[in-house]
Image: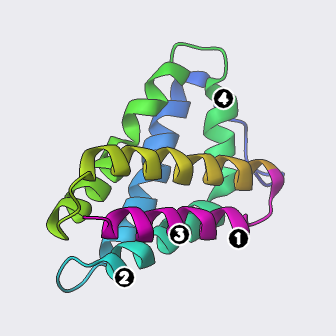
Amino acid sequence: MTMNTMPLMPEQALLAYRDFLRQVLTEVVGQMRGEASLSRLMQAMQVYWDACFDRRSQRTAAVQAAAGTRYAEQFESLGQPFLKLLRAELAQIGCPEADALSRDVYLCARNITVEEARTGRREMQNRQNVLYLLRHSALES
């Protein structure tokens, strides 16, 4: 947040968080060309992390504004489009455990973005660990 930016009011937090997610998903979906594949999904994960990192101050402002209010409880459901995207991609590449794996990957990926926003540092090793999990779990058939 810059010095000229007023802190968000709690009632603005949900809209700000939706805007953050919309921007991230637009960037992720915008790079997904061609047929579903594991490499396309892994590239989408990198775009997701980078897009979240680039917008971490926007996310942090929304989360801080909503902290301790009824709005904070609504944030979790807003991430569902990314979870659905993961599930659809995994199903299209023939992953037999697409539902469970998409949930695990989603939670890990989200936790990485939260930590990166908190520290201001990219969690490259954690990102690689999730990609390893994704690659090896998706290929087990």
- Residue 44 percent coordinates (x, y): 41, 72
Is 76 situated above or below 141? Answer: above
Query: On residue 132, which mark appears?
Result: 3
Residue position for label 4: 65
Q: Earlier in the sequence, mark 2 or mark 3?
A: 2
Q: Residue at (70%, 70%) from the top-left corner?
A: 124
Residue position for label 2: 39
* 19 relative to 12 in the view: left or right: left
Question: Distance between the Cα atoms at labels 4 and 1?
Answer: 28 Å
Query: On residue 31, which mark appears?
Result: none
Question: Distance between the Cα atoms at labels 3 and 1?
Answer: 12 Å
Residue position for label 1: 124
**Contact flag, marks 2 and 3 (Cβ < 8 Å):** no
Q: Earlier in the sequence, mark 3 or mark 1?
A: 1
**Contact flag, marks 4 and 1 (Cβ < 8 Å):** no
Q: Residue at (26%, 53%) from the top-left corner?
A: 98
Q: For the residue marked with disc 3, what is the amino acid?
A: Tyr
- Residue 53 percent coordinates (x, y): 64, 63
The boundaries of the magenta stretch are: 119-141
Q: Is residue 1 magenta?
A: no
Q: For the residue marked with disc 4, what is the amino acid?
A: Ala
- Residue 16 percent coordinates (x, y): 51, 42
